[in-house]
Amino acid sequence: MSANANIQRPQVEERKPRIYIGTRVFDISEKLKAEDLESAVQRGVQRAGATLELSGLQPETFVPFRDSSQNDLIADDKTLRLYAQDIEMLNTAILVVTYLDGLAKDEGVCFELGFARALGVPILIVNTDFIELGLPNGDVVSLDPLISLAATRTVRLQGLTEAPTFRSSLETAQRSAHDQVTASVCDILLQTKQRNIRPAPGAEGRASKFPDSVLSLYFDAGGEVYEWQRRLGDELVARSANKPNLQVARATRYSALCRSPADDVDAVMAADIVLTATDGDECPAGTAFVQGLARGLDKTVWMYDSKATSIVGPGGYVSSRNLMLDHSADRHFTTWHDVLAAVDEL
């Protein structure tokens, strides 16, 4: 199946459509940024208002850190509850809008973009980085190639306009980005027909989908940008060499010989098991996207995370990585030895 083909949702009962505002959640400045982005989105909804009413679309916005009451919720399973709510909101989304800025893109947001892509939800990305990424094949991109491929539209704003002060030039640039968001939201919504929403994938649907024939395992470690990531891929392939019932596919989007990042999406879609290596201060953007894509496609997800520290927040918030990654994996591995042992058991 082609990665560029539309992935349709099963038809189930209709629920309230929403626009999901993906955002970092841990600091005040990012939360303010999300509120400003939501205002731009709401202006786009208002601009399309009359036509949306005629088509039956009257979307609400959902901002995870605010609308899930993260600061007020106190529970031992707080992160699991937040995960379940965010997945439910993604399942009712007709559009996902987010900023993706900085060298390390937010792993939770990138997971959400992958999940949205699996459901065929339009994606609008805002990127204001002045830097770009040079690929081994000579291409220059602003985002991980998988995320660029998945985006319905990207608002890309690199430079600042001339203004009396540096601050005013920043403010003018931000207004320009938000004006483009408003126009893009309006355009996307006017092109979006009422769609049927499916419930979040349940564990019962993942019990055992492995036939007696060949299994396919897709491995993604940051797209194998670094040598240590390529070595993990080499070890995995070597370990499976004597297993005729197992085929291992690896990420190719950062290879000099890459034909298209769509090849990685195709490999995820064809896999029985998707194994991600998430090590780093932030899980690599493309790998987090792959895990979200795999979860949205109801694949079996294995996650290798050797992190020795935890994220600890108020009210019982404890997770290793972003909660979207932690709770979307069927199996967690903290050592590479355990990953190889699990492969041996296949």
Image (cartoon, helix red, strand yellow):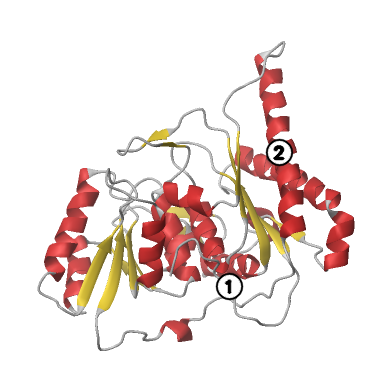
Seen in the picture, residue 332 relative to 255 is either above or below; the reply is below
Give the x, y percent position of residue 11.
Answer: 65, 81
Q: Nearer the viewer, residue 240 or 84?
A: 240
Q: Amino acid at mark 2?
A: Gln
Q: Earlier in the sequence, mark 1 or mark 2?
A: 1
Front of the two marks 1 and 2: 1
Residue at point 50%, 55% (across, down)? 108
Residue linked to disc 2: 180
Residue at point 43%, 45% (across, down)? 144
Residue linked to disc 1: 8
Helix, strand or loop at disc 1?
A: loop
| Residue found at the far left of this picture | 242
Left or right of 320: which side holds 305? Answer: left
Give the x, y percent position of residue 281.
Answer: 38, 45
Residue at point 80%, 52% (across, down)? 45
Helix, strand or loop at disc 2?
A: helix
Q: Residues within 10 Å of mark 2 (few under 14, many from 20)?
A: many
Q: Amino acid at mark 1?
A: Gln
| Residue found at the far bottom of this picture | 212
Seen in the picture, residue 136 relative to 15 is either above or below; the reply is above
Q: Nearer the viewer, residue 106 or 229?
A: 229
Give the x, y percent position of residue 40.
Answer: 75, 43
Q: Classify the position of the C terminus by image quarter.
A: bottom left
